Amino acid sequence: MGHQAGLAGDSPGTGKAMTPSSTKRRLRLVLWSAALTVILVPAVLAAWQWWSGRARADYARLLEKPADGADVDAEMESRIKSFCGDCHAVPLPESFPRDAWHEEVIKGYRFYVWSERTDLKPPPVQATVAYFRSRAPVQLALPQPEEAVNPFRASFMTERIDADPSARLPPAIAGLRWAKLRADSPPVILASDQSSGEIKCLEFSGPKRRVRRLAQLDSPCHMEPCDLDRDGSIDLLVADLGTLTALDHDRGKVVWLRQDARRGTFEKVVLASGLGRVADVRPIDTNGTGKLDLVVAEFGLYRTGKILLLRNVGSRGQWPRFEPEELDPRTGTIHVPVVDINGDGRADFLALVSNESESVEAFLNLGNGKFHRQTLWRAPDLTFGSDGIEVVDLNGDGKMDVLYANGDAFDNTYLSPWHGVQWLENLGNMQFKCHRLTDMPGAAVALAGDLDGDGDLDILVVSYLPYNLKCDPETAQQFASIVLLEQVSPGRFVRHTLERGLACHAAVVVGDFNGDGRLDFAVGTHLTGLHARELGPTWLTVWWNQGNVSGK
């Protein structure tokens, strides 16, 4: 995910369907990208380390697995903690099984080399590995969450939406939205597909299902409806990662899909390019004038990434024109939802920052075009696996809380005992209290909605784990992939597991799809997820809410 700005036009996002030759080219690109990542990246990293001045002398020793009984005295332990905790908290040994620590320590030393810092005195690699291995469990013991005693008051019926038979690429649904494209038309499900590069919409019209392609991008992720040019038409802002594979590059973009309301088509306009992997973009009225700026989460990877504000410097009556301003240089930002979090009437935004930070940050609008950063909560360990946040008044007290899912295992393919969902309760005066709601391997998205129609908000959680997860296959089949947390009293939840074994859902959306007064939901299929192949050509599964036993 990533970026940098400037206004540039591009060809319209609508048009003819992809030709067989273009589909073949994209298929070859996706397959070669994955293959090159697996084959070449480790080789390139190893070669780079070998020839790097500081890494050359230690490289052979990095590859030696030390004995578990290697001596680590008090002085060496102090050096290890000082080095490993210089720019973040010291990793907790119990976050990985014992055999994983050799690779994880080498990764940490590699990052230090990449940083080009020379102000620290790294302890011997063998001693660092021995320190973590000697304190780590042989195997991780994952929590076993308790299920609700009584069944959920609403039942669901599923419907699978399959890709067109001519599609040559497995689906990789990264984003879903339930939104209107016209003020006078029913909402539709918007979907972004990383493998095909499509932005498409699913329209419900009685028993009929119509899928319409809106635009062709590279690797689209988050979509945000807004009227960017204030012409009365609903446009879409799209965060484009640039590639399906996670790499440091400059192919990320911020794209404006400008709607021609008369034709119902969308013109693709690139607002910012030359970026790392861009994970999120949100419109924000920074000055309260109605003119929209953009806050951008450039996730990047290791060496790219930051949070940008694209200031709208265009004149009224003209197309928006943006100038970039860096607000935070850290890599790994996932979401940047806009909200007046301190109630002063100005638009602030929150940021979920992963990588070495694993924190929720508030960027408070000072009213003079500047923002003040304040940390709301920080995870206890680097392996927390932040995946997403939603801003919602979960307990109905009038204050906006943060719903936080953490289940990312794609950077190391290990399960983590930290994975799950928490509620950051807004206590007022910018104080937040963390409540752990459930444990769940791969928890990727948590959305709130009144799914049982009792007047309070429940929580829907889906999981997304890597297809090459280091786990026994039979055990992985038992992992919950869709969980519903029923709110039985303010702030108290019980758990209902709706699906197991299909941890390939990187996106979920909640809405009343058929207008019957009950909230339904839909989950996407992502090709890199665990057991995605079992869903075949299905790109979306709709869970229709059948109501409760009284027929409500």
Image (tube, rainbow, N blue to C red):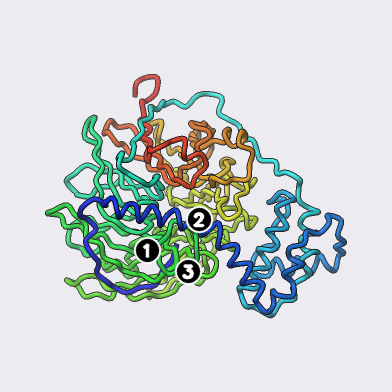
Residue identified by numbered label 3: 306
Return the x and y of residue 20 as percentages of the image width and height: 28, 50
Q: Position of residue 436 (x, y in %)?
A: 58, 44
Contact between labelled residues 2 and 3, with CB atoms less than 8 Å apart: no
Res. 340 in view: no
Quarter of image, res 365: bottom left
Residue in view at x 33 percent, y 40 percent: 163
Mark 2: give few (<14), some (14-19) or many (20+) Cα within 10 Å: few
Could you say which disc has been placed on residue 35 in the image?
A: 2
Query: On the rendered structure, is 332 left or right of 383?
Result: left
Q: Amino acid at mark 2?
A: Ala
Q: Amino acid at mark 1?
A: Ala
Q: Are marks 1 and 2 in contact (CB under 8 Å)?
A: no
Which residue is labeled 1 in the image? 347
Distance from label 3 to label 2 (Cα)? Answer: 28 Å
Q: Is residue 200 above or below residue 522?
A: below
At label 3, which amino acid type do we have? Lys
Is 150 placed left or right of 60 in the picture? left
The quarter of the picture where residue 105 lies is bottom right
Tag 3, which secondary structure?
A: strand
Q: How far apart in space, not on screen, are marks 1 and 2 (Cα)?
A: 44 Å
Q: Is residue 139 above or below residue 268?
A: above
